[in-house]
Amino acid sequence: MIEPRFLLVRLGSLGDIIHTLPAASALRDTFPEARIDWVVDPKWTRLLEGNSDLSGVIHFDRKNLRGMAATIRTLRAARYTCAIDFQSLYKSALLALLSGAPRRIGFERRYAREGLASLFYTDRVRPQGAHKVEHNLTLVESAGARRSPPRFPLMIHPEEDDRAARELAARAIREFFVLNPGGGWRSKCWPAERYGELHRKLAAYYGWSGVVTFGPGEEDLAERVVRAGGAPPPVAIPLTLGPLMAVLRRARFMVAADTGPLHLAAALGTPVVGLFGPTDPARNGPYSPGPCNVVVRNASDSQTTYRRGTTDSPAMLSISVDQAFAAVQRCLESRS
């Protein structure tokens, strides 16, 4: 019997890639000799480096027409037997089609982010379970994989760990926690000033330093947290993805909204407190095998939405600093 050759399509983003990793692990556990390649946006390649569940990682740079054509030629030359699209967008579904794989698995129209993308699939799957990780596992189960304990094989290079250590030592930071005020969409964000107030309470109670992490375009958010953070203020450290992983792994805990760094920290085994408003943590919450994740949410079912809101969400504004502080206490108490 010829071993299957799988192409996994998940181009971005950070949190979504994290939630797809267990699906790749289930495929590898079921088909130990199979070729399993992942096509991804170059921005997120770092997340897949050193992943022993994968045979290869293929860059797909949509900004370069010549590079796009070369990628498609590479995909077709691999002669995949099955392409699995976890993204459910026209671009990802079309990429699965152009790979030449005779079998193409994706989500059914009602679930797909862009419903008509399902027309490019040969197998349209209704997701099972509550969480995105479980939904993604449903796709690989359709390809014959057996469900196995979820793995998040994220590798931190020694030089990245050294960089993180230097950044922290330069600021005289030893024991610390992380606050991440970004959220991708404005409606998923908690006010920066409340992160600052939370920092004051946490620093006074635990005696640890606060580190503020942020992504491109979030510099103002980080600065607002620092200004509101009291004395001594938290420290904002700009980090690329590899050193960010190293910092998160060293942290005592992290507080963040529903955003990629929250899911990255959970996958690294760091205790997290997730602040959720319009999105449902049962579907999009931190997912890891450890017991140390706590979610704060006051939203009703009627406030649940995945629209990319550009204004503050009343559901997020309803979360108080005292609620977040109590959640941190519960999170850390669960470890003892």
Image: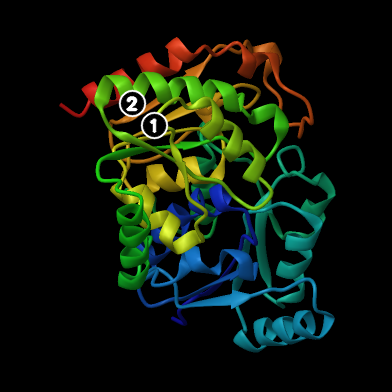
| SS of the residue under disc 2 | helix
For the residue pair 265 and 19, the one nearer the viewer reads as 265
Q: Please give the name of the residue rendered at 52% of the width and 27% of the height, measured from the top-left corner.
A: 281
Q: Quadrant of residue 174?
A: top left
Q: Residues within 10 Å of mark 1 (few under 14, many from 20)?
A: few
Q: Amino acid at mark 1?
A: Pro
Q: Please give the name of the residue rendered at 71% of the width and 39% of the height, measured from the top-left corner.
A: 111
Q: Are marks 2 and 1 in contact (CB under 8 Å)?
A: yes
Q: Position of residue 46 (x, y in %)?
A: 50, 67
- What residue is shown with label 1? 232
- What residue is shown with label 2? 203
User: The N terminus lies in which quarter of the figure?
Assistant: bottom left
User: The C terminus lies in which quarter of the figure?
Assistant: top left
Q: Please give the name of the residue rendered at 71% of the width and 32% of the height, measured from the top-left corner.
A: 186
Q: Quadrant of residue 202?
A: top left
Is residue 219 in view? yes
Q: Earlier in the sequence, mark 2 or mark 1?
A: 2
Q: Amino acid at mark 2?
A: Ala
Q: Quadrant of residue 34?
A: bottom left
Question: What separation in Å lies between label 2 and label 1 (alpha carbons)?
Answer: 9 Å
Image height of 67 relative to 108, above or below? below
Check the image and name the residue furthest to the left.
Answer: 336
Q: Is label 2 or label 1 in front?
A: 1
